[in-house]
Image (cartoon, rainbow, N blue to C red):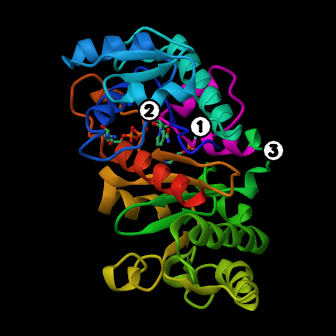
Amino acid sequence: MPSSAPLALTLGDPAGIGPELALSAWLRRKSERISPFVVCGGRRVLGEAAAHLGLDIETASVTDLADVPARFENALPVLDGADARYSPGDPDDEGAKAARASLEQGTVLARDGRAAAVVTGPVSKARLASTGFAFPGQTEFLADAAGLAPDAVAMMIAGPSLRTVPLTIHVALADVPETLSTELIVSRARIVAAALQRDFGLSEPRLAIAALNPHAGENGAFGDEEARIIAPAIAQLEAEGLLVSGPHPADALFAPRARATYDAALCMYHDQALVPVKALDFDQGVNVTLGLPFIRTAPDHGTAFAIAGKGLADPGATIAALKLAGEMAARRR
Ligand SMILES: NC(=O)C1=CN([C@@H]2O[C@H](COP(=O)(O)OP(=O)(O)OC[C@H]3O[C@@H](n4cnc5c(N)ncnc54)[C@H](O)[C@@H]3O)[C@@H](O)[C@H]2O)C=CC1
Ligand SMILES: NCC(=O)COP(=O)(O)O
Protein backbone atom coordinates (compact mmCIF):
# COMPACT_ATOMS: atom_id res chain seq x y z
CA MET A 1 0.00 0.00 0.00
CA PRO A 2 1.42 3.43 -0.87
CA SER A 3 2.12 5.45 2.31
CA SER A 4 -0.14 8.20 0.97
CA ALA A 5 -3.09 5.87 0.30
CA PRO A 6 -6.24 7.67 1.45
CA LEU A 7 -9.06 6.28 3.53
CA ALA A 8 -12.14 5.27 1.52
CA LEU A 9 -15.35 6.51 3.15
CA THR A 10 -18.56 4.94 1.92
CA LEU A 11 -21.71 7.00 1.60
CA GLY A 12 -24.12 4.94 3.66
CA ASP A 13 -27.80 5.25 2.83
CA PRO A 14 -28.16 8.66 1.15
CA ALA A 15 -31.47 9.24 2.94
CA GLY A 16 -29.80 8.79 6.32
CA ILE A 17 -27.19 10.88 8.10
CA GLY A 18 -24.22 9.43 6.14
CA PRO A 19 -23.88 12.32 3.67
CA GLU A 20 -23.93 15.02 6.35
CA LEU A 21 -21.45 13.05 8.48
CA ALA A 22 -19.01 12.96 5.54
CA LEU A 23 -19.41 16.72 5.11
CA SER A 24 -19.03 17.46 8.84
CA ALA A 25 -15.98 15.22 9.17
CA TRP A 26 -14.33 16.97 6.21
CA LEU A 27 -15.05 20.37 7.81
CA ARG A 28 -13.21 19.21 10.95
CA ARG A 29 -10.31 17.60 9.07
CA LYS A 30 -7.72 20.05 10.40
CA SER A 31 -8.87 20.47 14.02
CA GLU A 32 -9.30 16.69 14.35
CA ARG A 33 -6.17 15.82 12.31
CA ILE A 34 -8.07 13.37 10.11
CA SER A 35 -6.07 11.56 7.44
CA PRO A 36 -7.14 12.39 3.87
CA PHE A 37 -10.23 10.49 2.83
CA VAL A 38 -12.25 10.12 -0.35
CA VAL A 39 -15.97 9.42 -0.52
CA CYS A 40 -16.92 6.49 -2.76
CA GLY A 41 -19.48 7.94 -5.14
CA GLY A 42 -22.39 10.22 -4.30
CA ARG A 43 -21.14 13.57 -5.63
CA ARG A 44 -24.68 14.71 -6.40
CA VAL A 45 -25.96 13.54 -3.00
CA LEU A 46 -23.13 15.33 -1.19
CA GLY A 47 -23.59 18.53 -3.17
CA GLU A 48 -27.34 18.55 -2.54
CA ALA A 49 -26.82 17.72 1.15
CA ALA A 50 -24.34 20.59 1.54
CA ALA A 51 -26.79 22.99 -0.10
CA HIS A 52 -29.69 21.68 2.02
CA LEU A 53 -27.69 22.17 5.23
CA GLY A 54 -26.28 25.53 4.19
CA LEU A 55 -22.70 24.28 4.24
CA ASP A 56 -20.22 26.02 2.00
CA ILE A 57 -18.32 22.92 0.84
CA GLU A 58 -16.91 22.17 -2.57
CA THR A 59 -16.62 18.58 -3.72
CA ALA A 60 -13.79 17.54 -6.05
CA SER A 61 -14.20 14.70 -8.50
CA VAL A 62 -11.13 12.45 -8.40
CA THR A 63 -10.25 9.48 -10.55
CA ASP A 64 -6.68 8.93 -9.31
CA LEU A 65 -6.39 8.19 -5.58
CA ALA A 66 -2.91 9.71 -5.60
CA ASP A 67 -4.61 13.11 -6.06
CA VAL A 68 -6.67 12.81 -2.86
CA PRO A 69 -4.21 14.27 -0.31
CA ALA A 70 -3.73 17.47 -2.32
CA ARG A 71 -7.43 17.89 -3.17
CA PHE A 72 -8.45 17.15 0.44
CA GLU A 73 -6.97 20.47 1.58
CA ASN A 74 -9.63 22.58 -0.11
CA ALA A 75 -12.44 20.30 -1.23
CA LEU A 76 -14.11 17.04 -0.29
CA PRO A 77 -12.73 14.45 -2.74
CA VAL A 78 -15.32 12.14 -4.29
CA LEU A 79 -14.65 9.17 -6.55
CA ASP A 80 -16.79 8.59 -9.59
CA GLY A 81 -19.37 6.02 -8.62
CA ALA A 82 -23.01 5.41 -7.93
CA ASP A 83 -25.16 8.40 -7.06
CA ALA A 84 -28.68 9.34 -6.12
CA ARG A 85 -30.81 12.35 -5.36
CA TYR A 86 -30.70 13.64 -1.78
CA SER A 87 -33.95 12.82 0.03
CA PRO A 88 -33.23 12.98 3.77
CA GLY A 89 -35.51 10.78 5.83
CA ASP A 90 -37.13 9.26 2.76
CA PRO A 91 -35.21 6.10 1.81
CA ASP A 92 -35.85 4.54 -1.58
CA ASP A 93 -34.48 1.84 -3.90
CA GLU A 94 -32.22 4.23 -5.81
CA GLY A 95 -30.54 5.27 -2.55
CA ALA A 96 -30.20 1.69 -1.31
CA LYS A 97 -28.50 0.73 -4.58
CA ALA A 98 -26.12 3.69 -4.26
CA ALA A 99 -25.31 2.71 -0.64
CA ARG A 100 -24.54 -0.82 -1.76
CA ALA A 101 -22.40 0.27 -4.72
CA SER A 102 -20.43 2.65 -2.49
CA LEU A 103 -19.80 -0.14 0.03
CA GLU A 104 -18.66 -2.47 -2.75
CA GLN A 105 -16.38 0.19 -4.25
CA GLY A 106 -14.73 1.08 -0.92
CA THR A 107 -14.27 -2.57 -0.01
CA VAL A 108 -12.48 -3.36 -3.27
CA LEU A 109 -10.19 -0.35 -2.84
CA ALA A 110 -9.19 -1.44 0.68
CA ARG A 111 -8.90 -5.09 -0.28
CA ASP A 112 -6.61 -4.23 -3.19
CA GLY A 113 -4.47 -1.93 -1.05
CA ARG A 114 -5.37 1.19 -3.04
CA ALA A 115 -7.08 2.67 0.01
CA ALA A 116 -5.52 2.50 3.49
CA ALA A 117 -8.87 1.39 4.95
CA VAL A 118 -12.57 1.33 4.25
CA VAL A 119 -14.67 3.37 6.67
CA THR A 120 -18.31 2.57 6.12
CA GLY A 121 -21.20 5.00 6.46
CA PRO A 122 -24.43 3.82 8.08
CA VAL A 123 -26.69 1.65 5.97
CA SER A 124 -30.15 0.28 6.58
CA LYS A 125 -29.88 -3.49 6.65
CA ALA A 126 -33.52 -3.81 5.60
CA ARG A 127 -33.05 -1.40 2.67
CA LEU A 128 -29.86 -3.19 1.58
CA ALA A 129 -31.70 -6.51 1.67
CA SER A 130 -34.28 -5.03 -0.71
CA THR A 131 -31.53 -4.64 -3.34
CA GLY A 132 -30.79 -8.38 -3.12
CA PHE A 133 -27.81 -7.90 -0.81
CA ALA A 134 -27.35 -11.43 0.52
CA PHE A 135 -25.74 -10.64 3.88
CA PRO A 136 -27.29 -9.76 7.26
CA GLY A 137 -24.84 -6.87 7.69
CA GLN A 138 -21.75 -5.22 6.28
CA THR A 139 -19.50 -7.30 8.57
CA GLU A 140 -20.58 -10.53 6.91
CA PHE A 141 -20.27 -8.93 3.45
CA LEU A 142 -16.70 -7.80 4.22
CA ALA A 143 -15.73 -11.29 5.41
CA ASP A 144 -17.07 -12.74 2.17
CA ALA A 145 -15.28 -10.09 0.07
CA ALA A 146 -12.05 -11.14 1.78
CA GLY A 147 -12.73 -14.80 0.98
CA LEU A 148 -13.39 -15.61 4.63
CA ALA A 149 -16.19 -17.44 6.41
CA PRO A 150 -18.38 -15.24 8.66
CA ASP A 151 -16.84 -16.90 11.73
CA ALA A 152 -13.34 -15.84 10.69
CA VAL A 153 -14.00 -12.21 11.59
CA ALA A 154 -15.12 -10.50 14.77
CA MET A 155 -16.98 -7.24 15.37
CA MET A 156 -15.35 -5.00 17.94
CA ILE A 157 -17.05 -1.90 19.30
CA ALA A 158 -14.34 0.41 20.57
CA GLY A 159 -14.90 3.55 22.60
CA PRO A 160 -12.75 5.59 24.94
CA SER A 161 -14.24 3.78 27.99
CA LEU A 162 -14.17 0.18 26.81
CA ARG A 163 -13.99 -2.29 23.95
CA THR A 164 -16.56 -5.03 23.52
CA VAL A 165 -16.98 -7.88 21.06
CA PRO A 166 -20.36 -9.53 20.41
CA LEU A 167 -19.64 -13.22 19.75
CA THR A 168 -22.95 -13.63 17.97
CA ILE A 169 -23.98 -10.67 15.84
CA HIS A 170 -26.95 -10.44 13.53
CA VAL A 171 -29.00 -13.36 14.87
CA ALA A 172 -32.29 -13.45 16.72
CA LEU A 173 -31.91 -13.49 20.49
CA ALA A 174 -33.82 -16.78 20.59
CA ASP A 175 -31.12 -18.36 18.39
CA VAL A 176 -28.16 -17.19 20.50
CA PRO A 177 -27.85 -20.22 22.85
CA GLU A 178 -27.74 -22.71 19.97
CA THR A 179 -25.36 -20.49 17.96
CA LEU A 180 -22.82 -20.29 20.78
CA SER A 181 -20.17 -22.99 20.98
CA THR A 182 -16.83 -23.50 22.65
CA GLU A 183 -15.16 -23.45 19.22
CA LEU A 184 -16.81 -20.13 18.30
CA ILE A 185 -15.66 -18.48 21.54
CA VAL A 186 -12.12 -19.83 21.17
CA SER A 187 -11.75 -18.80 17.55
CA ARG A 188 -13.17 -15.29 18.07
CA ALA A 189 -11.03 -14.78 21.21
CA ARG A 190 -7.90 -15.64 19.22
CA ILE A 191 -8.91 -13.08 16.54
CA VAL A 192 -9.50 -10.42 19.20
CA ALA A 193 -6.21 -11.08 21.02
CA ALA A 194 -4.25 -10.92 17.76
CA ALA A 195 -5.95 -7.68 16.72
CA LEU A 196 -5.35 -6.04 20.10
CA GLN A 197 -1.66 -6.81 19.65
CA ARG A 198 -1.40 -5.82 16.00
CA ASP A 199 -3.77 -2.87 15.74
CA PHE A 200 -4.01 -1.51 19.28
CA GLY A 201 -0.41 -2.00 20.44
CA LEU A 202 -1.24 -4.17 23.46
CA SER A 203 1.46 -6.80 23.88
CA GLU A 204 -0.43 -8.90 26.46
CA PRO A 205 -4.13 -8.24 25.93
CA ARG A 206 -6.53 -9.19 28.72
CA LEU A 207 -9.88 -10.62 27.66
CA ALA A 208 -12.91 -10.81 29.93
CA ILE A 209 -15.59 -13.25 28.85
CA ALA A 210 -19.17 -12.52 29.83
CA ALA A 211 -21.67 -15.09 30.97
CA LEU A 212 -24.88 -15.62 29.02
CA ASN A 213 -27.30 -16.07 31.89
CA PRO A 214 -28.11 -13.91 34.93
CA HIS A 215 -25.55 -14.43 37.72
CA ALA A 216 -23.53 -16.56 35.31
CA GLY A 217 -26.23 -19.22 35.61
CA GLU A 218 -26.14 -19.40 39.45
CA ASN A 219 -24.48 -22.81 39.41
CA GLY A 220 -26.84 -24.10 36.76
CA ALA A 221 -30.07 -22.87 38.38
CA PHE A 222 -30.81 -20.62 35.38
CA GLY A 223 -28.88 -22.09 32.51
CA ASP A 224 -25.88 -24.30 31.91
CA GLU A 225 -24.15 -22.54 28.97
CA GLU A 226 -21.50 -21.17 31.33
CA ALA A 227 -20.38 -24.63 32.49
CA ARG A 228 -21.06 -26.45 29.23
CA ILE A 229 -19.77 -23.96 26.63
CA ILE A 230 -18.02 -20.90 28.09
CA ALA A 231 -15.82 -22.37 30.85
CA PRO A 232 -14.26 -24.99 28.52
CA ALA A 233 -13.43 -22.21 26.05
CA ILE A 234 -11.73 -20.21 28.78
CA ALA A 235 -9.73 -23.27 29.86
CA GLN A 236 -8.60 -23.87 26.28
CA LEU A 237 -7.60 -20.24 25.76
CA GLU A 238 -5.68 -20.20 29.06
CA ALA A 239 -3.87 -23.36 27.97
CA GLU A 240 -2.81 -21.47 24.85
CA GLY A 241 -1.29 -18.77 27.05
CA LEU A 242 -3.93 -16.06 26.58
CA LEU A 243 -4.92 -13.84 29.52
CA VAL A 244 -8.60 -14.67 29.85
CA SER A 245 -11.06 -14.39 32.71
CA GLY A 246 -14.71 -15.34 33.19
CA PRO A 247 -17.44 -16.28 32.75
CA HIS A 248 -18.34 -12.97 34.39
CA PRO A 249 -21.92 -12.05 35.33
CA ALA A 250 -22.60 -9.41 32.69
CA ASP A 251 -24.42 -6.98 34.97
CA ALA A 252 -21.24 -6.03 36.84
CA LEU A 253 -18.78 -6.42 33.96
CA PHE A 254 -19.07 -2.84 32.72
CA ALA A 255 -18.73 -1.04 36.05
CA PRO A 256 -15.64 1.22 36.17
CA ARG A 257 -13.68 -1.08 38.55
CA ALA A 258 -14.33 -4.10 36.37
CA ARG A 259 -13.45 -2.24 33.15
CA ALA A 260 -9.99 -1.54 34.55
CA THR A 261 -9.24 -5.28 34.60
CA TYR A 262 -9.55 -6.05 30.88
CA ASP A 263 -8.76 -4.69 27.42
CA ALA A 264 -11.82 -6.16 25.71
CA ALA A 265 -14.99 -7.83 26.93
CA LEU A 266 -16.27 -10.73 24.84
CA CYS A 267 -20.04 -10.77 25.00
CA MET A 268 -22.51 -13.47 24.11
CA TYR A 269 -24.92 -11.42 22.01
CA HIS A 270 -25.21 -8.12 20.13
CA ASP A 271 -26.94 -5.95 22.73
CA GLN A 272 -24.86 -7.27 25.65
CA ALA A 273 -21.86 -5.78 23.84
CA LEU A 274 -23.35 -2.67 22.28
CA VAL A 275 -25.48 -1.31 25.12
CA PRO A 276 -22.54 -0.46 27.42
CA VAL A 277 -20.52 1.22 24.67
CA LYS A 278 -23.53 3.23 23.46
CA ALA A 279 -24.45 4.20 27.04
CA LEU A 280 -20.93 5.41 27.77
CA ASP A 281 -19.54 6.55 24.43
CA PHE A 282 -22.37 6.90 21.87
CA ASP A 283 -20.70 9.73 19.95
CA GLN A 284 -17.28 8.10 19.90
CA GLY A 285 -18.15 4.42 19.44
CA VAL A 286 -16.35 2.77 16.53
CA ASN A 287 -17.21 -0.56 14.96
CA VAL A 288 -14.04 -2.36 13.81
CA THR A 289 -14.09 -5.60 11.83
CA LEU A 290 -11.24 -7.74 13.20
CA GLY A 291 -9.66 -10.61 11.29
CA LEU A 292 -9.88 -9.08 7.81
CA PRO A 293 -6.72 -8.74 5.72
CA PHE A 294 -7.60 -5.04 5.32
CA ILE A 295 -8.83 -2.36 7.72
CA ARG A 296 -12.52 -1.57 8.19
CA THR A 297 -14.01 0.80 10.73
CA ALA A 298 -17.42 2.48 10.99
CA PRO A 299 -19.36 4.74 13.33
CA ASP A 300 -21.29 2.49 15.67
CA HIS A 301 -24.68 3.95 14.95
CA GLY A 302 -27.24 3.61 12.23
CA THR A 303 -28.90 5.70 9.57
CA ALA A 304 -30.95 7.85 11.99
CA PHE A 305 -33.49 8.55 9.23
CA ALA A 306 -35.65 10.65 11.59
CA ILE A 307 -32.99 13.33 12.06
CA ALA A 308 -31.40 13.20 8.59
CA GLY A 309 -31.00 16.58 6.94
CA LYS A 310 -31.91 18.48 10.12
CA GLY A 311 -28.39 19.41 11.17
CA LEU A 312 -28.71 17.33 14.35
CA ALA A 313 -26.35 14.46 13.53
CA ASP A 314 -23.23 14.36 15.69
CA PRO A 315 -20.20 13.48 13.54
CA GLY A 316 -18.15 12.32 16.55
CA ALA A 317 -18.36 8.59 15.90
CA THR A 318 -17.56 9.03 12.20
CA ILE A 319 -14.55 11.18 13.06
CA ALA A 320 -13.46 8.58 15.63
CA ALA A 321 -13.83 5.85 12.97
CA LEU A 322 -11.75 7.82 10.46
CA LYS A 323 -9.08 8.55 13.06
CA LEU A 324 -8.88 4.96 14.30
CA ALA A 325 -8.60 3.72 10.71
CA GLY A 326 -5.73 6.16 10.15
CA GLU A 327 -3.99 5.01 13.34
CA MET A 328 -4.41 1.35 12.44
CA ALA A 329 -3.04 1.99 8.94
CA ALA A 330 -0.03 3.83 10.36
CA ARG A 331 0.65 0.97 12.77
CA ARG A 332 0.50 -1.59 9.95
CA ARG A 333 2.89 0.35 7.67
N1 LIG B 1 -23.07 0.09 10.85
C1 LIG B 1 -24.27 0.37 10.37
O1 LIG B 1 -24.40 0.67 9.20
C2 LIG B 1 -25.46 0.32 11.28
C3 LIG B 1 -26.70 0.41 10.69
N2 LIG B 1 -27.81 0.38 11.45
C4 LIG B 1 -29.07 0.52 10.71
O2 LIG B 1 -29.62 1.79 11.00
C5 LIG B 1 -31.03 1.71 10.92
C6 LIG B 1 -31.64 2.43 12.09
O3 LIG B 1 -31.26 1.75 13.28
P1 LIG B 1 -31.54 2.26 14.74
O4 LIG B 1 -31.56 1.07 15.60
O5 LIG B 1 -32.71 3.18 14.76
O6 LIG B 1 -30.23 3.03 15.17
P2 LIG B 1 -29.71 4.49 14.86
O7 LIG B 1 -28.31 4.51 15.37
O8 LIG B 1 -29.95 4.88 13.46
O9 LIG B 1 -30.60 5.47 15.76
C7 LIG B 1 -30.73 5.29 17.18
C8 LIG B 1 -30.95 6.66 17.85
O10 LIG B 1 -29.71 7.37 17.86
C9 LIG B 1 -29.84 8.60 17.18
N3 LIG B 1 -28.59 8.81 16.44
C10 LIG B 1 -27.92 7.90 15.70
N4 LIG B 1 -26.79 8.42 15.23
C11 LIG B 1 -26.73 9.68 15.66
C12 LIG B 1 -25.79 10.75 15.49
N5 LIG B 1 -24.65 10.60 14.80
N6 LIG B 1 -26.06 11.95 16.07
C13 LIG B 1 -27.18 12.12 16.79
N7 LIG B 1 -28.10 11.15 17.00
C14 LIG B 1 -27.87 9.95 16.43
C15 LIG B 1 -31.05 8.44 16.26
O11 LIG B 1 -31.62 9.68 15.93
C16 LIG B 1 -31.94 7.56 17.11
O12 LIG B 1 -32.60 8.33 18.07
C17 LIG B 1 -31.39 0.23 10.84
O13 LIG B 1 -31.86 -0.02 9.56
C18 LIG B 1 -30.08 -0.51 11.06
O14 LIG B 1 -29.96 -1.58 10.18
C19 LIG B 1 -27.76 0.30 12.81
C20 LIG B 1 -26.54 0.23 13.44
C21 LIG B 1 -25.30 0.21 12.71
N1 LIG C 1 -25.07 -2.47 15.56
C1 LIG C 1 -23.86 -2.61 14.85
C2 LIG C 1 -24.14 -3.20 13.57
O1 LIG C 1 -25.13 -3.88 13.41
C3 LIG C 1 -23.20 -2.94 12.49
O2 LIG C 1 -23.30 -3.92 11.55
P1 LIG C 1 -22.39 -3.96 10.27
O3 LIG C 1 -23.17 -3.28 9.22
O4 LIG C 1 -21.12 -3.30 10.60
O5 LIG C 1 -22.22 -5.39 10.00
- Left or right, 206 with respect to 109, comes to left
Residue type pointed to by label 1: Ala
Going 76% across and 41% down the picture, which residue do you hit? 144
Secondary structure of the residue carrying numbered label 2: helix
Q: Which residue is mark 1?
A: 115
Quadrant where the C terminus sits is bottom right
Earlier in the chain: of badge 3 and badge 2, it is 2
* Residue 175: percent from left, percent from top: 67, 56
Tell me the distance, in whole angstroms, between the alpha carbons under discs 1 and 2: 12 Å
Secondary structure of the residue carrying numbered label 1: loop
The part of the image, by quadrant, that contains residue 142 is top right
Q: Which residue is mark 3?
A: 147
Q: Is residue 168 magenta?
A: no
Q: Nearer the viewer, residue 264 or 129?
A: 264
Q: Is residue 127 magenta?
A: yes
Number of numbered markers: 3
Q: Which residue is mark 2?
A: 69
Going 21% across and 20% down the picture, which residue do you hit? 55
Structural crowding at the residue carrying mark 1, measured as other residues with C-alpha within 10 Å and reported as few (<14), some (14–19) or many (≥20): many
